[in-house]
């Protein structure tokens, strides 16, 4: 995505909203394919045991707080 993408940007808000509906979708939008797959599969497996909400929350927070490696703080 854009080089302006970082914590608190509109891109992260959209990614967090996407992860709210489908765990891992926000990470997929951010280009983090492996993490998206891990979160999607873990959520699917854990929802069988009614623990998928843990991965769901992790997915949302991970998308919302993502700071790309090329973005400087301060």
Image (spheres, grey):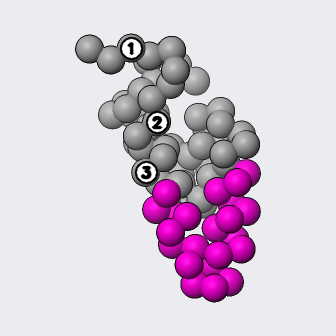
The segment highlighted magenta reads 37-58
Of the pair 73 and 26, the residue shown nearer to us: 73
Magenta: main secondary structure: helix
Q: Is residue 49 magenta?
A: yes
- 35 vs 56: above or below: above
Task: Assign a secondary structure to mark 2.
Answer: loop
The C terminus - image quarter: top left
What distance separates the C-alpha of mark 1 from that of mark 2?
Answer: 13 Å
For label 3, the residue is 61
Return the disc, 3 or 2, that comes first in the chain's sequence.
3
For label 2, the residue is 66
Q: Is residue 17 left or right of residue 37?
A: left
Identify the residue shown where x is 57% and y is 84%: 50
- 14 vs 10: above or below: below
Instruction: Give the quadrant of residue 71.
Output: top left
Q: Is residue 51 left or right of residue 33?
A: left
Return the x and y of residue 33 as percentages of the image width and height. 71, 40
Extreme residue in the bottom direction: 49
Task: Assign a secondary structure to mark 3.
Answer: helix
Label 2 environment density (alpha carbons within 10 Å; few <14, some 14–19, many ≥20): some
Identify the residue shown where x is 63% and y is 85%: 49
What distance separates the C-alpha of mark 3 from that of mark 1?
Answer: 20 Å
Q: What numbered label is drawn on residue 6?
A: none
Of the pair 12 and 38, the residue shown nearer to us: 38
Return the x and y of residue 28 as percentages of the image width and height. 65, 42
Return the x and y of residue 23 as percentages of the image width and height. 59, 59
What distance separates the C-alpha of mark 3 from that of mark 2?
Answer: 8 Å
Q: What numbered label is drawn on residue 72?
A: 1
Return the x and y of residue 7 as percentages of the image width and height. 37, 32
Q: Is residue 25 left or right of residue 2?
A: right
């Amino acid at each position: 995505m854009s080089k302006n993408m970082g914590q608190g940007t509109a891109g992260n808000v959209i990614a967090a909203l996407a992860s709210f509906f489908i765990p891992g979708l926000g990470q997929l939008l951010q280009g983090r394919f492996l993490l998206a797959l891990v979160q999607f599969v873990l959520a699917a497996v854990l929802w069988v045991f009614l623990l998928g909400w843990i991965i769901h929350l992790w997915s949302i927070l991970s998308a919302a707080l993502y700071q790309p490696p090329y973005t400087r703080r301060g």
